[in-house]
Amino acid sequence: FSGAGGGNDIQWCFSQVKGAVDDDVAEADIISTVEFNHSGELLATGDKGGRVVIFQQEQENKSQSHSRGEYNVYSTFQSHEPEFDYLKSLEIEEKINKIRWLPQKNAAQFLLSTNDKTIKLWKISERDKRPEGYNLKEEDGRYRDPTTVTTLRVPVFRPMDLMVEASPRRIFANAHTYHINSISINSDYETYLSADDLRINLWHLEITDRSFNIVDIKPANMEELTEVITAAEFHPNSCNTFVYSSSKGTIRLCDMRASALCDRHSKLFEEPEDPSNRSFFSEIISSISDVKFSHSGRFMMTRDYLSVKIWDLNMENRPVETYQVHEYLRSKLCSLYENDCIFDKFECCWNGSDIVMTGSYNNFFRMFDRNTKRDITLEASRENNKPRTVLKPRKVCASGKRKKDEISVDSLDFNKKILHTAWHPKENIIAVATTNNLYIFQDKTN
Amino acid sequence: MECSLDAQSLISISLRKIHSSRTQRGGIKLHKNLLVSYVLRNARQLYLSERYAELYRRQQHHHYPEGAPLLAMPACPPPPPPPPPPPPPAVPAELPALPLPSEQDARSCAALRGGAELLEVPGCAAPAACRDSAPGFYRANGAGAAGGGGGGGGGSAAPGLLYAAGCDFGSGGAPHCSSRTTVLDLDTHVVTTVENGYLHQDCCSQCPCCCQPSAGLPSAPGTKRKYYPGQEEEEEEGVEEGEPGGGGVAGGPPFAPPCTKRARFEEYSAEHPQDSSNISNLISIFGSGFTGLVSRQQADTEQPLNGQLCSKQALASLGAWTRAIVAF
C-alpha cells in the first residue's frame, strides 16, 4: 500500500460523489449497503428501494497518472421487490441489507444480494458483440421468405455498444423466519451462510431448495430470549470457521467440523462490562452491529454503538485494542434513544490488517491506524468537492470552549449518518455512503 | 449517567416505540424490540428502587396494625399453588424489615402465569377485607411457570392486578388510590399517563379504597372485546422443521415473523417478576396477556403468527384492557 501505515499517514482526497444533490431525500434512494468486489474494479451499492447500482473503475489513463480511474455506472437493476405476506399481514421490505461479491471465475461477475427474507444470486455479464448476417432471418428477426434465399451466409459477430445485463441465477427463499442481517461467502467459494436474528443457515450456491441450519439460538420458550444474532462472517481462510456476534456484545467462533449444529461455540469472545459505565442504555450500546475479519484472518473487528474493538482470535477474554468512535455521545444517550439514533447500526471495514474505518454522525467518518495509534475524523460533504483536495481533519468539541474549526456536540446533525463504508481490497480508495450519496476518496498520490 | 428523563418517561417512550414498531414496514424487528425491553426493565428497576426507598421511609413513620406492611390483595379465587417466590432482585438493602412471603402466602393469580409479580404498596391495607391475603410482599412467581393450566383461569385475579397499581399509603386517613399509570391504548394509539388510573369495573370489590371511579380510563365497562379465538402468536411449526427453504416455490408463504411482542414481554415479565405499582400493572398485563396466549397444551400445534390473534382464554381473564392488549 502506498503510504499506508507505518510512518506515512494517508492523505485523503475527494475523488467523486454519486447521487442526487437534493436535500430532500427519497426514501428509496437511501443507500443500505456498499461493497467492492475482489479486484476492486467494481463497486456495488444497494438501496432501500431494492435496487443495486454497480460502478466500474475506468482503466487507468496514462495521461492522468496522478489519479486512479474514476468509477462510473456500470449496471443498475432491481434486485428485490416489496412482497406482502397475506397470511400474516406483513410487508417484506425490498431494502437490500447486504451485497457480497463472488470471486470472478469467468467473464461474468456474480454477486449475492439479500433483503430481509430472500437471497438472490445475480449474474452480471457484458455483451459487446452481436451476431449479424443471418441466412434465414432479417436483421430485425423476421424470417425471410425461403424462396428469396439464394445464397448461404454465415452470421458473424460485429461490435455493438456495450450492454451490461444482470440476471437472477438463483433465488434462495423461504429459509428465514426472522430478518436476515448478514450473508458471507465461504472461502471454498461454493457455500455461503445467511444469518437472521436467531438462526444461521448454510447454503450451497448451486442448490436453492435446501439449506442447512448451523446455528439456532431460539430458546424453547421465547420468554427466555435474551439475545439475538446481529452479524456473522466466515473466516477468510478457514472454510470450516465462522463467527457470529450478538446483541449482548459477545462474539462466538464456531467450527463446523465439531458438529452439524454449531450451537456450542468453540470460542466465546466477551469483555466484561465496566460497571462505572452502567446506564439505562448499557444493553443497547453494547450490542454489536458489525463484525469483520482482518484480511489475514488473525484478527476480527467488532463495532458497537460507541466503539470499535479489535480482537485477536487467540484471546477470548478481552479485545486487544478498543477505539472510541464518538465517546462524546455517551452523555447524550437519552436523546439518542428518544430519536432512535441509538439503534443505528454502523458498519466497519479493514484496510488489510492495519487501519480500520467506521462511520459516525454529521457525515463524519473515522479511521484508526493500529500501528501509529493515530486516528482521524473526516467529513463526506459536497463542500470539499474539488478533486484532489486533501480532506481537512475534523474535530468534535465535547465540552468546554470550542476552538475554531471544531464542531460542538450539540450542533452535530444526527440525520446525517454514515453507516456503510468500504475499502478497496488493494488500493487506498474508499467508498463512503451518506444517506443517499456515495463518496469516493483516494489517497493523494505523488 | 445523566439522563434528562425520569424512569416513568423512559417507560412511556419505550412503550411508544414498541407500539409504533407494529406498524413499521417490514414487520416487527425482534432485535430492536428486545433492546427496548431492556430499557424498560432498567427503568422499572430504577422506579422500583425509588419506590422501595420511599416506602421504607414512610414505613419508618407509620404504625401498621399488624406490624407488617400490608399488601392489600383482593381476594382471589383459590389460585393454583404458587411456585416458590424467587429472591427479590431489586430490593435495596435497606428494606430488610419487610417480610417476605412464605410460600403459602404468595398466591399466584392465575392470570399472572407469565411471571408478573406484584408488589403492592402498603396503605391500602386498611380495608379489612383486603387483609385476607398475605402480609408482606405479595408475590406470584410465574417465571417459567410450567404448564399452561393457569392461563385463563384467573379471571378475577386481573382485577387485583390492576388494583394493585395505585394505592398510596395515606397516613391513616381514607386511603385513596393515587398514582400515575402509563397507559398505552392500542385502539387510539395514544400513550397517556393516567392519574389515579385503574379500572373501576375490574377493581376488587372488596377493597373499598379502590372502588372509586377514576378519570382518564379509556375503557368503559361493558366494552365489547375483540378477539380472534383459536390461534395464537406462535411461530409457524413448519418454519422450524422445514428449515431447508423451498427455493423457487412459487407462492410459498414466507416463514412466520417472530413472536417479538410475546417474546419481549414474556422475557420482561419472566426476568423481573417483582413488580410495583403503575408500571408493573401495565407490564404485567402485557405479560399475562401474552402468557395467556401461549398455553402449553397449545404449544404443540404452533400456528401461524398473527399479531392480532389472541387466545380466548387470556382475553377472558383480562379486564377492559383487553382490547389494548389484544392488538399486541
Image: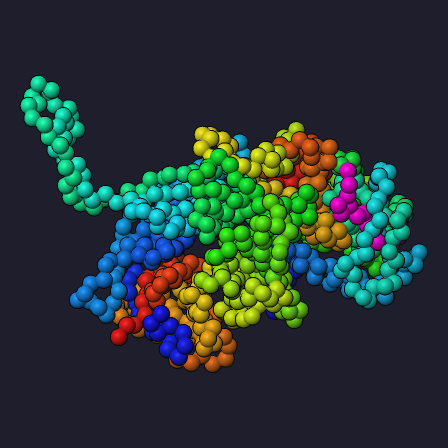
Report whether A253 appears left or right of A431.
right
Relative to the observer, which residue lies in front, A393 or B219? A393
Outermost residue on the top side: it is A147
User: In the rendered view, would you say A31 is above or below A398?
Assistant: above
Q: Which quadrant does the N terminus of chain B fall into?
A: bottom right
User: In the rendered view, would you say A283 is above or below A106?
Assistant: below
Count of number-bearing discs: 0
Relative to the observer, which residue lies in front, A91 or A288? A288
> Which corner quadrant of the image does residue B161 belong to?
top right
Relative to the observer, which residue lies in front, B232 or A138? A138
Report whether A50 appears left or right of B2.
left
B83 falls in the magenta region: no
**At x 49% / y 43%, what residue is drawn?**
A203
In the image, residue A38 lies at what x, y percent?
37, 56
Q: Which quadrant does the C terminus of chain B fall into?
A: top right
In the image, residue B273 lies at what x, y percent?
75, 51
Report whether A17 appears left or right of B286.
left
Q: Main secondary structure of the magenta part?
A: loop
- Range of residues picked out in magenta: B135-147
Relative to the observer, which residue lies in front, A274 or A417? A274
**At x 57% / y 49%, what residue is drawn?**
A256
B145 falls in the magenta region: yes
User: In the rendered view, would you say A262 is above or below A18?
Assistant: above
**At x 58% / y 53%, what residue is drawn?**
A255
**At x 57% / y 34%, what residue is drawn?**
B242
Asked whether residue A137 appears in the rendered view, the answer is: yes
